[in-house]
């Protein structure tokens, strides 16, 4: 038997587009001699479909698309993920299902058992878990078919579930395991995925074909990295990250085993490629083409400009330099040099006169009060207004350039520098931004060196530095990481050697600025705990406030 992995990029709700992509993959796999073509979890509808699943018409279209795909199975079988209706009145109305299609019709359906409800996942909101587990036979081979999380309870030191679906299937003596998945990207997730799949093979002594989704859906990024494992746990192939791939494997060769083929897992290349794909898919799937951003001469906007040019093409990126009376000459020159290096269109719009007009209007009301954050925020909001004006006039989507450190502690202005349709680096700490800049410059100085080496500054008052308001980033970011990603308490973090007053101050800033994050653009997720749909905190909570 020959089994094809179709690592494809589905689009939520784009039934015709998803179908055409799958039909093309089926033809490719047939040309490779495949007997079965395997697609990812919920690939008929795209993942995650969220509340679209509550529309009866959405489910009807999914069912029709499954039937159309089944009609193309003459000469080759297909495994594909899609919702299916629960015929029982009790329980949720839907299952998250894996369909086996052959000879023009649906031959078998296995429902997902373990429904994740953590981080970005909310599957128990929509789906009923499976209550029975069966293998099916095709061309003399007994196949155990599971969906994503169904394999993630094995070998877990802190199991989330009380059942392992494969344990239930083993009595039926399967010959191989196939798992269709939509497992999202995080820069440190790939090694964990390899460990989990190896653990399953070690437990069941069966070959495993693991098919993962690739592509981005709003803020959630899927890296692919589909796997083929021999019964001895060898990773015979880990498919490329961030690429659509259709590749066929001979089951006999998989049973025999051989040398391992693994993808590189360096953090910065993975983070860079994920952000580029996330940007490209956000624009492509929404039908947008052109982006605009404010280019300040600082490192955050520089990184976003490079990512945008690589994701969308230089002709589709426009940058606006908006110096004020507090902007240094080198910031303007650095920004101009970067724009020229990238070959993107740039405009220079000084904002001093606009700011002074605000001062004049507000002078009777602000009289005798010193310059403070109010005047600083006016400058940021002027820039945001100008970017939105260009967006409305020319149809560009504004890219937000705030990093994760700033978002965490509220070091940004709502409706100013925090505006935008997509937060590109909102899951990248400031220290990681510097690493990313160095990676981008690995083949030559694309980002001017001065942008990387100068002290970070918002340049909203004379001689301002970020460290006037914040700790050094190499002190701040580890504390943020322990609190946000690792969910450590203040006492836990202090025991690691950090100053108690500093820890309390930083964590309080994170919590009291939750209201800002609730109003920001979707954040491309590249870590295990990003701001947005995967981190649900109350705005008015008292904890550490």
Image: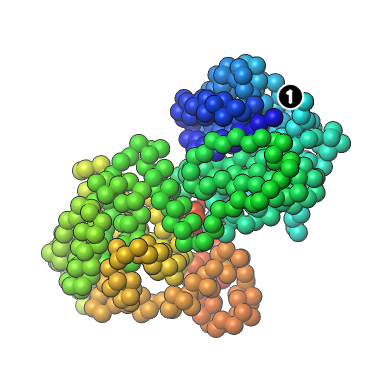
Colouring of the image: rainbow
The image shows residue 77, relative to residue 336, as above or below, that is above
Q: Is residue 410 among the parts visible in the rendering?
A: no
Q: Quadrant of residue 239?
A: top right
Residue 7 x %, y %: 55, 38
Quick check: 542 left or right of 437?
A: right
User: Which residue does the image show at 74% across and 55% down from the upper left?
Assistant: 156
Residue 511 x %, y %: 51, 66
Farthest right residue in view:
171
The image shows residue 206, relative to residue 304, as above or below, that is above
Mark 1 burial class by Cα count in 10 Å: few <14, some 14-19, many 20+ = few
User: Which residue does the image show at 31% across and 65% down from the upper left?
Assistant: 444
The image shows residue 543, relative to residue 341, as above or below, that is below
Q: Quadrant of the N terminus?
A: top right
Residue 283 x %, y %: 37, 42
Residue 459 x %, y %: 26, 72
Quick check: 57 left or right of 113?
A: left
Residue linked to disc 1: 139
User: Which residue does the image show at 59% across and 53% down from the upper left?
Assistant: 262
Q: Is residue 40 among the parts visible in the rendering?
A: yes
Q: Nearer the viewer, residue 146 or 251?
A: 251
Q: Nearer the viewer, residue 381 or 542?
A: 381
The image shows residue 517, relative to residue 283, as above or below, that is below
Quick check: 220 left or right of 4?
A: left
Q: Quadrant of residue 126?
A: top right
């Amino acid at each position: 038997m020959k089994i094809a992995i179709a690592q494809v990029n589905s689009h939520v709700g784009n039934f015709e587009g998803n179908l055409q992509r799958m039909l093309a993959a089926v033809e490719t796999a047939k040309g490779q001699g495949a007997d079965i073509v395997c697609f990812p979890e919920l690939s008929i509808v795209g993942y995650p479909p969220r509340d679209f699943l509550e529309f009866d018409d959405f489910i009807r279209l999914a069912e029709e698309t499954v039937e159309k795909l089944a009609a193309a199975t003459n000469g080759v079988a297909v495994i594909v993920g899609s919702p299916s209706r629960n015929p029982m009145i009790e329980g949720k109305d839907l299952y998250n299902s894996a369909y086996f299609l052959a000879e023009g019709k649906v031959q078998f359906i296995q429902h997902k058992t373990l429904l994740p409800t953590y981080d970005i996942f909310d599957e128990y909101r929509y789906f009923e878990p499976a209550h029975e587990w069966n293998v099916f036979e095709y061309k003399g081979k007994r196949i155990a078919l599971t969906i994503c999380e169904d394999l993630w309870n094995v070998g877990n030191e802190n199991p989330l579930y009380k059942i392992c679906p494969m344990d239930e299937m083993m009595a039926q003596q399967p010959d191989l395991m196939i798992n269709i998945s939509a497992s999202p990207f995080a820069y440190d997730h790939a090694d964990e995925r390899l460990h989990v799949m190896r653990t399953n093979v070690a437990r069941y002594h069966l070959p495993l074909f693991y098919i993962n989704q690739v592509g981005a859906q709003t803020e959630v990024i899927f890296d692919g990295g589909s796997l083929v494992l021999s019964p001895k746990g060898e990773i015979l192939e880990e498919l490329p990250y961030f690429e659509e791939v259709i590749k066929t494997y001979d089951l006999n060769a998989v049973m025999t085993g051989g040398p391992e083929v693994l993808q590189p897992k360096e953090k910065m290349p993975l983070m860079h490629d994920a952000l580029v794909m996330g940007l490209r898919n956000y624009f492509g799937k929404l039908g947008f083409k052109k982006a605009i951003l404010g280019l300040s001469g600082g490192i955050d906007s520089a990184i976003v400009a490079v990512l945008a040019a690589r994701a969308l093409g230089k002709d589709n990126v426009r940058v606006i330099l908006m110096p004020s009376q507090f902007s240094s000459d080198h910031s303007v020159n650095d920004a101009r040099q970067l724009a020229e290096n990238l070959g993107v269109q740039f405009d220079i719009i000084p904002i001093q006169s606009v700011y002074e007009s605000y001062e004049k209007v507000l002078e009777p009301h602000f009289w005798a009060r010193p310059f403070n954050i109010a005047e600083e925020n006016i400058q940021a909001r002027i820039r945001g207004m100008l970017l939105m004006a260009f967006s409305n006039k020319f149809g560009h989507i504004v890219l937000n350039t705030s990093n994760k450190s700033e978002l965490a502690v509220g070091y940004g202005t709502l409706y100013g520098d925090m505006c935008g349709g997509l937060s590109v680096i909102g899951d990248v700490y400031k220290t990681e931004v510097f690493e990313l800049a160095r990676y981008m410059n690995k083949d030559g100085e694309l980002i001017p060196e001065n942008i990387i080496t100068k002290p970070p500054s918002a340049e909203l008052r004379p001689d301002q530095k970020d460290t006037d308001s914040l700790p050094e980033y190499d002190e701040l970011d580890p504390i943020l990481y322990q609190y946000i990603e690792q969910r450590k308490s203040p006492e836990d973090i202090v025991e690691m050697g950090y100053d108690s007053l500093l820890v309390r101050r930083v964590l309080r800033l994170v919590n009291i600025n939750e209201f800002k994050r609730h109003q920001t653009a979707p954040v491309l997720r590249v870590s295990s705990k990003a701001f947005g749909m995967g981190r649900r905190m109350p705005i008015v909570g008292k904890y550490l406030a």
